[in-house]
């Protein structure tokens, strides 16, 4: 008597269906990694929340008198973007570690869609930014933040945070994968610190020295903060929104393809 075993269907690791399936599975993995990384959670939630309280206590009245509005409408967008940036930096460090350990190479030789791991990292990062934005804006209501313009502009606030976070994370990926010798954390921490202290959320643009005002007014974080503030309390939004989109799309275009190429090189080599 011959024993017959059921035939196992052959599933290709190529194609759109495989990409969706494998991206979903690996996104779950990336989400679990983030949830188990207490340092990342502290950087993306606790540190921005404490900064929010500090800015309100120390600078709240001064900013309110200078702008004529509650300082929360600048502070909350500021800490949301800071949380997105610091979380992205933690993700870049984690990616560098996985590259050195050979995990990327092991994933690359498995029957998994070649683009699934890369896209899963982006999907997990967007989920982290979205959840962080929800938590921080709800926490911001304690110090006066409100969604005064209704439901659709409120969705626009979250969309701006996601767009800004996606562009910054793409830059992080490109730097993290381009060379293992790049001091990723010091470079990006310096950039994030400059953005954090020279923007319209920390202080009105008019309060900066005249020579710095054009730079502060047109840097990416200021554009995103002005857009989120206008969507929350009303006011002109077109100019700041256009600048935000241009900065974000520019970052995605300039660093997107290098990040993809660098990921492939990192996956096929272990150095």
Image (tube, grey):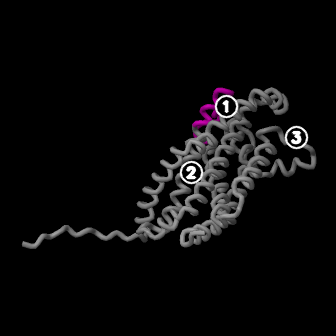
Gap in angstroms between the C-alphas marked 2 and 3: 33 Å
Q: Which mark is residue 239?
A: none
According to the picture, the residue beneath numbered tag 3 turns out to be 206
Q: Is residue 268 visible?
A: yes
At mark 1, the secondary structure is loop
Answer with the quarter of the image where residue 269 lies.
bottom right
Who comes first in sequence, dot 2 or dot 3?
Answer: 2
Q: Which is closer to the viewer, label 2 or label 3?
A: 2
Q: Are marks 2 and 3 in contact (CB under 8 Å)?
A: no
At mark 2, the secondary structure is helix
In the image, what residue occupies the spot 41% across and 60% down? 21
Q: Which residues are magenta?
A: 135-152
Q: Which is closer to the viewer, label 2 or label 1?
A: 2
Answer with the quarter of the image where residue 201 lies.
top right
According to the picture, the residue beneath numbered tag 2 turns out to be 126
Who comes first in sequence, dot 2 or dot 1?
Answer: 2
Who comes first in sequence, dot 3 or dot 1?
Answer: 1
Is 252 within the magenta? no
Q: x%, y% of residue 204?
A: 83, 39
Is 141 within the magenta? yes
Placement of the N terminus among the 4 image quadrants: bottom left
Label 3 Cα crowd, 10 Å radius (few <14 / some 14-19 / many 20+): some
In the image, what residue occupies the spot 56% across and 51% down? 126
According to the picture, the residue beneath numbered tag 1 turns out to be 145
Gap in angstroms between the C-alphas marked 3 and 1: 22 Å
Answer with the quarter of the image where residue 154 lies.
top right
Q: Is residue 153 visible?
A: no
């Amino acid at each position: 008597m011959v024993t017959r075993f059921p035939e196992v269907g052959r599933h290709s690791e190529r194609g759109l269906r495989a990409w969706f399936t494998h991206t979903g599975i690996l996104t779950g993995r990336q989400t679990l990694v983030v949830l188990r990384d207490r340092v990342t959670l502290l950087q993306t939630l606790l540190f921005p929340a404490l900064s929010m309280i500090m800015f309100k206590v120390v600078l709240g009245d001064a900013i309110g008198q200078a702008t004529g509005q509650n300082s929360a409408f600048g502070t909350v967008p500021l800490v949301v973007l800071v949380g997105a940036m610091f979380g992205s930096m933690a993700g870049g460090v984690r990616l560098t570690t996985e590259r050195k350990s050979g995990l990327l190479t092991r994933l690359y030789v498995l029957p998994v869609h070649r683009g699934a791991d890369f896209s899963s990292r982006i999907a997990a990062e967007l989920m982290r930014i979205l959840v962080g934005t929800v938590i921080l804006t709800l926490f911001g209501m304690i110090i006066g933040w409100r969604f005064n313009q209704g439901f659709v502009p409120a969705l626009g606030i979250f969309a701006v945070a996601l767009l800004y976070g996606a562009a910054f994370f793409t830059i992080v990926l490109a730097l993290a994968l381009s060379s293992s010798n790049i001091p990723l954390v010091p470079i990006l921490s310096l950039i994030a610190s400059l953005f954090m202290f020279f923007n319209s959320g920390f202080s009105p643009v008019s309060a900066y020295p005249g020579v710095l005002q054009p730079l502060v007014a047109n840097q990416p974080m200021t554009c995103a903060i002005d857009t989120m503030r206008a969507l929350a309390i009303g006011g002109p939004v077109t100019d700041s929104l256009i600048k935000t989109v241009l900065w974000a799309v520019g970052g995605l275009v300039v660093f997107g393809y290098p990040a993809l190429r660098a990921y492939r090189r990192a996956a096929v080599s272990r150095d």
